[in-house]
Image: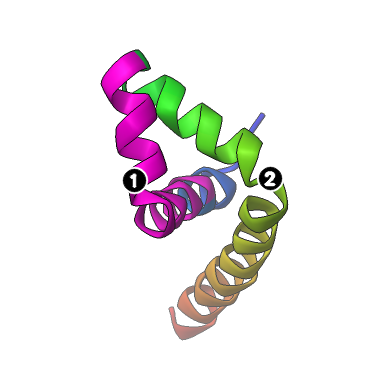
Amino acid sequence: MVSGIEARARVEAEGKLLKRHRREYERVAGKKGHVDAVRSLVKAHKTEYDKIIAQVMVRKRAEATNNVSAA
């Protein structure tokens, strides 16, 4: 099961891929729709996606730790 932090990290990473590869997304989305276009981007740019996920996860976990310690 995916944790809340991981789910938010995936959404953020997908958004960053969409911005970086806008033309590719628009081309695929026009033919197959949004979900398949995102899947295609993730598959085509898996290494980049994994790096973004790792960066976002570190940041999200740090934010969660800071929020817990501040409470």
Q: In which quadrant of the rendered image does the N terminus lie?
A: top right
- Quadrant for the C terminus, please: bottom left
Q: Quadrant of residue 3?
A: top right
Q: Which residue is mark 2?
A: 46
Q: Position of residue 8 (x, y in %)?
A: 46, 49
Residue ID at (68%, 45%): 46
Answer with left or right where residue 32 lies relative to residue 54. Answer: left
Residue 20 part of the magenta-drawn span: yes
Q: Is residue 26 above or below residue 67?
A: above
- Tag 1 secondary structure: helix
Q: Amino acid at mark 2?
A: Lys
Question: Marks 2 and 1, how far apart in space?
Answer: 17 Å
Magenta segment, which residues? 10-31
Residue placed under numbered mark 1 in the picture: 23
Mark on residue 63?
none
Q: Residues within 10 Å of mark 1 (few under 14, many from 20)?
A: few
Q: Compared to 58, does 11 lie above or below?
A: above
Residue at (46%, 52%) from the top-left corner? Answer: 17
> Which is nearer the N-term, disc 2 or disc 1?
1
Secondary structure under tag 2 reads helix
Q: Amino acid at mark 1?
A: Arg
